[in-house]
Amino acid sequence: MANTWDYGPLGAEVKNRVKREWWNTFIRSRGDVVGLDSAILMNPKVWEASGHVTSFNDPLVDCKKCKERFRGDKILEEKLGVEAAAVLKLDQVKAMLDAEEINCPNCEERDWTEAKQFNLMFETKQGVVKGEGDSIYMRPETAQGIFVNFKNVVQTMRPRLPFGIGQIGKAFRNEITPGNFTFRTREFEQMEIEYFVDPDNIGDTFDEWQKAVWTWYTDLGIDKKNLRVREHEKDELSHYSSKTVDIEYEFPWGWGELFGLANRGDFDLAQHEKTSGEDMKYTDPDDAERKFLPHVIEPSFGCDRTILTFLIEAYTEEELENGDVRTVMKFDKRLAPVDVAVLPLSKKEPLREKAKEIYESLLAETNLVVDFDITGSIGKRYRRQDEIGTPLCITVDFGTIGEDAEQGDPDTLTIRDRDTLKQDRIPIGKLREKIAEYWKS
Ligand code: ATP
């Protein structure tokens, strides 16, 4: 299967760290947002209520010559720009492809079908009898899991408006044209918040979220010049939204959506109330007579897309003084997959034993991710850690074990900074303090 990706050991660590940063920033360190972990498989009526069964479609066009299928709006984007392509009506897509003389990206011929609506939800069967069972959907977004739990959260956590519910989890979309590495895949992870507000008192909530998200990205190392905000035109808005703003990133292939912020009004709660018959209203804690459906501001992040931007931003090639080029992943230190690497200058004993002792004490006494590497020359091992993005390398040499005064005093070691390449000689006893200092800076 093309366009299905797995994260290896280092990638999984980066992913966990991105999620941790997100959870810490938007849930743990805010008094007004709580977390949730809802199911992927839900009652199919949820997707009728949310509008996904009827409206979660993309315009599909077929090339009659080679039978390849494309998203009409996406192939028009290059010619017309994102805004103009996104507002095209279904019956305008083929005419526009012909008018703009756009050929099939696969076979270079021009023989398009009319565009038709293609629903992006994956269906599966629930039940144990082969050939029978009910059709259910794999969730195409995590948001609806939050809406159907709204009442439970209000009853158990007793939050006051405004408050949010956030969650991280997988979503599935049968994308017509997945691609550009992990930018668009059929299985991906989202990090979403539904922020419930009193409709009579929304204030600057939308702008505050936009600012908070922008700050999160830039604080974790995304250069401002690679980010821009784009507000959706009226015709482009999703069926549930009265205002949507995307934060876009300049990917190597052009600007693309990284994050979306939408004002969903009371669309979802009203729809679930109507479909389930369950009263979803919130009672004003200061006025028991006042019951209403809160409105919702939704910050929606793609986890994998976010990781992709961090990878692109971190990737650096640098020419060294000796003319060599080093590749270094300049991750923010909170996102690097390895925190510290312990490298004995040589794999000979007793150097290796000493280095291992330091490595094991860091593993046991800190919660850092620590790597231990003895394979290859020290230069090669530094390059390897640079490619991983390890912020600090600790080198144990013959000075450390009292066998070579020129390398350094006994019981000292060197600590190397990934970005400045500066190496400090410090006593072993100061190692923990130095590492802590670095993490505070
Ligand atoms: P696009 O216009 O790129 O299809 P969308 O507007 O459908 O995206 P939303 O429904 O707003 O996306 O989803 C929120 C976020 O989820 C997006 O900003 C993006 O980061 C992420 N996302 C959406 N679809 C995919 C996908 N197929 N693969 C990876 N991430 C995705």
Image: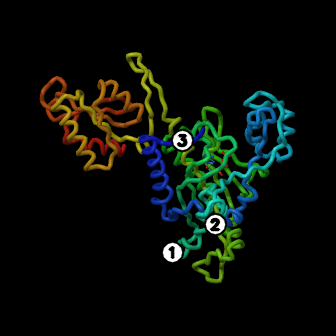
Secondary structure type for disc 2 = loop
Query: Closer to the camera, 6 or 256?
Result: 6
Number of residue marks = 3
- Which residue position holds label 2? 43
Some atom of ligand 1 lies within 8 Å of the CB belonging to the residue at label 2: no
Three-letter amino acid code at the position of disc 2: Asn
From the image, state whether disc 3 or disc 1 is nearer to you.
Answer: 3
Direction from residue 317 to residue 107 in the image, left or right? right
Q: Are marks 3 and 1 in contact (CB under 8 Å)?
A: no
Query: Closer to the camera, 287 or 20?
Result: 20
Crowd band around label 2 with a 10 angstrom C-alpha radius: few (<14), some (14–19), many (20+): few
Q: Earlier in the sequence, mark 1 or mark 2?
A: 2
Q: Residue furthest top?
A: 323
Secondary structure type for disc 3 = loop
Q: Are marks 3 and 2 in contact (CB under 8 Å)?
A: no
Three-letter amino acid code at the position of disc 1: Thr
Q: Position of residue 209 (x, y in %)?
A: 59, 55
Q: Residue furthest front?
A: 130
Q: Are marks 1 and 2 in contact (CB under 8 Å)?
A: no
- Which residue position holds label 1? 156
Q: Does any portion of residue 386 appear in the rendered image?
A: yes
Residue at 62% of width from left, 75% of height from top? 282
- Which residue position holds label 3? 5
Label 3 – label 1 distance at C-alpha? 38 Å
Residue at 64% of width from left, 57% of height from top? 124
Crowd band around label 3 with a 10 angstrom C-alpha radius: few (<14), some (14–19), many (20+): few
Q: Earlier in the sequence, mark 3 or mark 2?
A: 3
Q: Quadrant of the C terminus?
A: top left
Direction from residue 409 to residue 238 in the image, left or right? right
Label 1 – label 2 distance at C-alpha? 22 Å
